[in-house]
Amino acid sequence: VELWFDGTLSPAATAWWWSTGESIWGANVDYTVRCKAKDDAGNWQSVLVSTNTFKYDPNPPTSAPSVPQDGVYYRTLSSLEGTSDDDGALGSGVSKVWVRLARLTNPTTTYYWNWLTAWDTNETNKTNANAPFDNWTKSASGITWDSGNKYKIQCWAEDQATNVESPGAGNIFYYDNVKPTSTVSVPVDNACY
């Protein structure tokens, strides 16, 4: 469908614009904008030399962590992993994924990994995941995991149209790298029965 609209000309006739509400645009649709000029004598420009194509994408992408899994105990973690999507092939495409780690063991204070060397209380601590973003990864090398602690991983994505997803609920997981112990209590050692 091709529609032509009258634009507004600047006072010096060096620029033009056309304003509309967002309600005319269809989500995840490709549009082409062309322009042609008419002078005061009524002559129309014969060759359309300016054409721009764009996609309208008002929807935020989605993302989710897949490793660590929710409710699972780990004794080693070398990589953080997850997925993201922006309406499949229809959206503008995911441009970045952020990852946040929280340590939840302290009942009154949540600590966040600062992606350098320490856990602190700065909730804005996050890092960029590595592409490809449909199956993103982030190395867990250097993260200080404390045995017996509960952790949460969250992620959120941004697409090429700068729509940003709200952080999801994430996955809660546990870290335990201490071996269990066991003893024999019955029969008693060196006893007679």
Image (cartoon, helix red, strand yellow):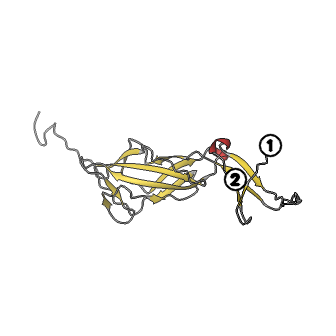
Using the rendered view, name the quadrant where residue 39 is placed.
bottom right
- Image location of residue 75, percent across then percent down: 36, 51
**Image check: 14 left or right of 60?**
right
For the residue marked with disc 1, what is the amino acid? Val
- Image location of residue 43, percent across then percent down: 89, 59
Query: Is 148 in front, or is 52?
Result: 52
Question: Residue under circle 2?
Answer: 18
Query: Is 81 in front, or is 108?
Result: 108
Disc 2 element: loop
Quadrant including the N terminus:
top right
- In the picture as drawn, the residue positioned furthest to the top comes out as 193
For the residue marked with disc 2, what is the amino acid? Trp
Image disc number at residue 1: 1
Disc 1 element: loop
**Image check: 191 left or right of 53?**
left
The residues bearing labels 2 and 1 have C-alpha atoms spaced at a distance of: 18 Å
